[in-house]
Amino acid sequence: MINKTNLKKYLRAIKKWNQKVMTCEDLVEVTGTKMEKIKDDLSLFYPLINFDPDFNIKDIEQNLAEKLEILEKQNPVKTNERILKRNEADRYKGIIDYIYQNMTFAGGLLNTGYIISKRDVKILKKLVKSEYDKLYKKRKK
């Protein structure tokens, strides 16, 4: 199965190639990918590529472009999660305060169905670090 990155790399190399015929050996020289990997990836589009060393890869360029469109529709580009700002962790007095505000019901009972997100973990890390620093400083004195 061909992945989107390799597919883009192959298409870019095919489009830049100025000659009419491009073989697997030419694609190896341009992309730096191993011959076996290229043949394995392109066997989806032309099954006899392992037996035909002079096959023109430019003949399947349209099929490669269509496959790329399908892959991009299936896996859209993910946006990065928003960056944790310094003041988000500072608005809580400590770990207990954070848990009480976010992970409890109205009566103060702990919500066992709460799913911790990556953002929660980042905030909790900052809070744990700040409380650890407070405890360590007290011990030094």
Image (tube, rainbow, N blue to C red):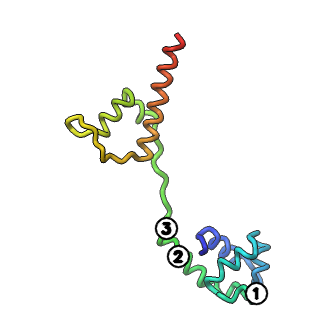
**Is 56 on the left or on the right of 93, as rendered?**
right
Measuring 48% from the left and 59% from the top, which residue is drawn there?
78
- Closer to the eye: label 1 or 3: 3
Residue 43 is situated, as x and y percent measured from the top left of the image, at 65, 83
Q: Looking at this view, is 4 or 43 the one in front?
A: 43
Mark 3 nearby-residue class (10 Å; few <14, some 14–19, many ≥20): few
Q: How far apart are marks 2 and 1 (CA)?
A: 24 Å
Kindly check if marks 2 and 3 are in contact, taking CB atoms under 8 A apart as contact. Answer: no
Mark 1 nearby-residue class (10 Å; few <14, some 14–19, many ≥20): some
**Is 8 on the left or on the right of 125, as rendered?**
right
Secondary structure beneath dot 1 equals loop
Residue 29 is situated, as x and y percent measured from the top left of the image, at 79, 73
- Closer to the eye: label 2 or 3: 3
N-terminal-most mark, 1 or 3: 1
Secondary structure beneath dot 2 equals helix
The residue type indicated by label 1 comes to Val
N-terminal-most mark, 2 or 1: 1
Kindly check if marks 1 and 3 are in contact, taking CB atoms under 8 A apart as contact. Answer: no
Q: Report the residue marked by disc 2.
A: 69
The residue type indicated by label 3 comes to Asn
Secondary structure beneath dot 3 equals loop
N-terminal-most mark, 2 or 3: 2
Which label number is shown at residue 75?
3
Q: Quadrant of residue 34?
A: bottom right
The residue type indicated by label 2 comes to Glu
Q: How far apart are marks 1 and 3 (CA)?
A: 32 Å
Residue 57 is situated, as x and y percent measured from the top left of the image, at 70, 84
Is the residue 99 above or below the residue 28 in the image?
A: above
